[in-house]
Image (cartoon, helix red, strand yellow):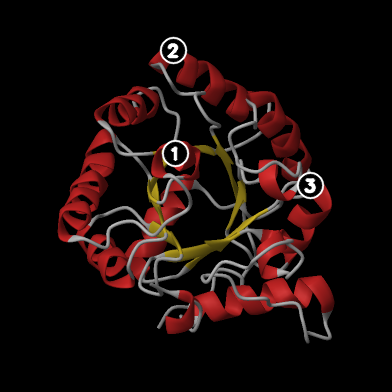
C-alpha cells in the first residue's frame, strides 16, 4: 500500500526530479497545484503538495488577460522567484511562455534563466511537433529537466479556435499516443495531459515510463493538477468542467481546502466522472 510522502511519521524533504518516476513506479499519486506568490506557495507546500507549477495561466488569473499569450519570460521569472521563497518540500516547475522556445537557442536561454534566476527545477513546453520534440531533446541533453504538455495546449488557442477537448476522434487519439511516446524518447521527465478523454489518458499513462499529470484527463493519470484560484472557487467566469471548488463550505479555510484536494488526489477520488471527458 502506498504511504504518503507527507505522512506525519516521515520527515519531509525536498522533492527531486527522480522522485517523480519513483512515485509512478510505486503507484503514488502526484499532487500538483499552481501558485504565483510566496504566500500561496507556502500554504500549498505545508498542505502537502508535491509539485508547484508557476504556469503561464498567470496571464489570465493574475494579469487579467484573455489568454496566456501575453506572458513573458520576465513575468515567469518574477513569479518563480516569489514562489521559490515559499517552498520547502515541493518541486518547482515553470512554464516556458508563448514563442520562448521557437528556436533551440532561445529555448536554452529562457530555460537557463528560469532555472538560474527563477529557481525552478524543471520547465514545461507545450506541443508534440517535430520542432518541439527536438527542443525537448536539446534541453534534456544539456541537463535541463523538461515536462511535456499534450492535449489541449493553451498557447495554441488561436490556431485551435478556443479551448476544446482534444483526442476524441480516432486519428487525433492515435496522434496523441504517438506524441506521448515521442516526448519520452526525446527526454521528457513528465507529461501533462490536458482536456483529453479519460480512456485516452489511461492508455497513455499505462504505456509510458514517465509520470502523467492530468487536468481534465480523468483519474487514471499518475497525478493531478489544478490552478489554485480555480480549486479555491475565486476565478471569475464559467468554471471548467474539470474543476472542483474545494474551499466553499470548508470551515478550515484555504489550507484545509488544499489539504482536501491533496487527499482526494491521493485517494483517487478526484477527479470524478463529472470532472472528466
Image spot of residue 276 (x, y percent): 42, 74
Q: Which residue is the extreme one toward the front?
A: 161
Q: Residue at x 58, y 70 (%)?
A: 243
Q: Which mark is nearer the camera, 1 or 3?
A: 1
Q: Nearer the viewer, residue 107 or 49?
A: 107
Residue denoted by label 2: 105
Q: Which mark is residue 37?
A: 3
Identify the residue at horizontal 35%, vertical 25% (top origin).
Answer: 135
Q: Position of residue 12 (x, y in %)?
A: 64, 62
Q: Give the residue number, with chain letter if any, for mark 1.
A: 156
**Foreground disc of the pair 1, 2:** 1
Give the CA distance from mark 1 to mark 3.
26 Å
The answer to whether the residues at label 1 and label 3 have Cβ atoms under 8 Å apart is: no
- Residue 6 vs residue 224, the one in the foreground: 224
What is the secondary structure assignment of the residue under circle 2? helix
Q: Position of residue 126 (x, y in %)?
A: 42, 39
Instruction: Give the secondary structure at mark 3.
Output: loop
User: On the rendered structure, is 158 left or right of 59?
Assistant: left
Residue 8 seen from this side: no
Q: Is residue 66 left or right of residue 95?
A: right
Residue at 28% in and 41% down: 183
- Residue 116 in the image, given as x and y percentages of width and height: 63, 24
How crowded pointer 1 is (Cα within 10 Å; few <14, some 14-19, many 20+) is rated as some
Q: Quick one: label 2, few (<14), some, or many (20+) residues within 10 Å?
A: some
Of callouts 3 and 2, which one flags the residue occurring earlier in the amino acid sequence?
A: 3
| Front-lying residue, 84 or 272 | 272
Marks 1 and 3, the one that precedes in the sequence: 3
Amino acid at each position: 500500500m502506498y504511504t504518503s510522502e507527507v505522512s506525519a511519521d516521515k520527515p519531509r524533504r525536498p522533492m527531486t526530479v527522480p522522485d517523480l518516476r519513483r512515485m509512478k513506479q510505486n503507484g503514488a499519486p502526484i499532487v500538483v497545484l499552481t501558485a504565483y506568490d510566496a504566500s500561496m506557495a507556502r500554504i500549498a507546500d505545508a498542505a502537502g503538495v508535491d509539485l508547484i507549477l508557476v504556469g503561464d495561466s498567470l496571464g489570465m488569473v493574475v494579469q487579467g488577460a484573455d489568454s496566456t499569450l501575453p506572458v513573458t519570460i520576465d513575468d515567469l521569472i518574477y513569479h518563480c522567484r516569489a514562489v521559490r521563497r515559499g517552498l520547502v518540500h515541493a518541486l518547482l516547475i515553470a512554464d516556458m511562455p508563448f514563442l520562448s522556445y521557437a528556436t533551440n537557442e532561445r529555448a536554452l536561454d529562457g530555460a537557463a534563466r528560469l532555472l538560474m534566476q527563477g529557481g525552478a527545477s524543471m520547465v514545461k513546453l507545450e506541443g508534440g511537433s517535430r520542432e518541439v520534440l527536438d527542443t525537448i531533446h536539446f534541453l534534456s541533453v544539456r541537463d535541463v529537466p523538461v515536462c511535456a504538455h499534450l492535449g489541449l495546449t493553451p498557447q495554441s488557442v488561436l490556431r485551435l479556435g478556443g479551448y476544446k477537448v482534444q483526442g476524441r476522434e480516432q486519428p487525433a487519439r492515435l496522434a496523441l499516443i504517438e506524441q506521448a511516446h515521442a516526448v519520452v524518447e526525446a527526454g521528457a521527465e513528465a507529461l501533462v495531459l490536458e482536456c483529453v478523454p479519460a480512456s485516452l489518458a489511461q492508455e497513455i499513462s499505462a504505456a509510458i515510463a514517465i509520470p502523467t499529470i492530468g487536468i481534465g484527463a480523468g483519474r487514471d493519470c499518475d497525478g493531478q493538477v489544478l490552478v489554485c484560484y480555480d480549486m479555491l472557487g475565486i476565478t471569475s467566469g464559467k468554471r471548467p468542467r474539470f474543476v472542483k471548488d474545494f474551499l466553499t463550505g470548508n470551515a478550515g479555510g484555504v489550507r484545509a481546502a488544499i489539504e482536501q484536494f491533496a487527499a482526494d488526489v491521493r485517494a483517487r477520488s478526484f477527479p470524478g466522472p463529472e470532472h472528466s471527458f
